[in-house]
Image (cartoon, rainbow, N blue to C red):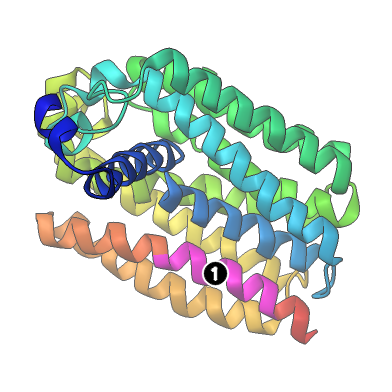
Amino acid sequence: MPEIVEALPAASARPVIRATSSAVVRDYVTLTKPRVMSLLVLTAVCAMVAAAGGAPAPLPLAALVLGGALACGGASALNHVLDRDIDRLMGPRTASRPVAAGRIAPARAVVFGLALSALSFLVLAAFANPLAATLAASGGAFYVLVYTLWLKRTTPHNIVIGGAAGAIPPLAGWATAQGRLGLGAGFLFLIVLLWTPPHFWALALLLAPHYEAAGVPMLPVVRGVSATTRQMLLYTLALVVATLVPGLIGTFGATYLAAAVLLGGVLGTLAWRVWRDSTPARAGLLFHYSLLYLALLFVAVAADAAIR
């Protein structure tokens, strides 16, 4: 192959170099888990909008978007490094990830992840406030050190406790607007915390053989399908109740409460159906709807603040 490339004219060789560079860029972007990042940043931004009464200051808002994305991306890159042995055992999808497949060296991914995390702290500290920067950094550290390094490999309750990492971005968003935390921030933290188990266990039902092959003690592997779907339903009911409370006591307004009732009704119905008869199609539908549910619920939080 090198001889073929050297025999080509310079004009023909350049596209090959560009394609290789694009592949490298794609791999580094993959390290940041952009889909996960986008949802976490959305929850942070909506929390900031709510805390700012619907009109957040532009510069801190931009800092939150950039700093939040960097924090999520940095933690995700470190997760790729620590999970590379598991990823190789969980089927083609995870085995093809950049670090697991050997396309990016672990040391380079660590440097990349730490650099993003450090830049996140600097951006948020400089253009938002130190509390927001500290919260974003603590969320990343919790995800990497507590969930990935410890809980994921040791207990079927890993995602119940580890879900706190994903619940921190709304706190960072609230702190960006007010420089402190409040009751509304606490409710948003609780909502994400309770949302995480049914959301993730729906996926775990679909990937149970892969988790078992990798030796990861996810709930469906350790306790079975019946116990998992029962826990999913219980957490979903607790989540729906928790979402109604801030609307009923006036922390959030009527627009939010209407959205919480409607969205929660659908989520509860889907969780009940999975509990009654767990099929891959029903588990998949619950998993995908739960993503939409959280996004729309947080959009309702922001819209409610803007309307009020």
Name the quadrant of the N terminus. Answer: top left
Number of marks in the rendered image: 1
Asked which secondary structure carries label 1, the reply is: helix
Classify 243 as above or below 84.
below
Drawn side of residue 22 relative to residue 203, left or right: right
Look at the image and say whether residue 251 sits in the magenta stretch: no
User: Label 1 belongs to which residue?
Assistant: 297
Name the quadrant of the C terminus. Answer: bottom right
Residue drawn at x 30%, y 70% as measured from the top left: 269
Determine which quarter of the picture holds residue 231.
top left
- Front residue of 214 and 267: 214
Residue drawn at x 16%, y 62% as measured from the top left: 282
Residue 270 in percent (x, y) is at 27, 66
Classify 10 Å Cα crowding around label 1: few (below 14), some (14-19), many (20 and above).
many
**Magenta: main secondary structure:** helix
Drawn side of residue 264 relative to residue 17, left or right: right
Residue 298 in percent (x, y) is at 59, 66
Drawn side of residue 150 relative to residue 189, left or right: left
Residue drawn at x 11%, y 26% as measured from the top left: 3
Q: Identify the amino acid type marked 1.
A: Leu
Q: Is residue 224 visible?
A: no
Q: Is residue 237 visible?
A: yes
Determine which quarter of the picture holds residue 54.
bottom right
Residue 188 in percent (x, y) is at 65, 55
Residue 94 in percent (x, y) is at 22, 33
Q: Which residues are magenta?
A: 292-303
Residue drawn at x 79%, y 42% as measured from the top left: 124
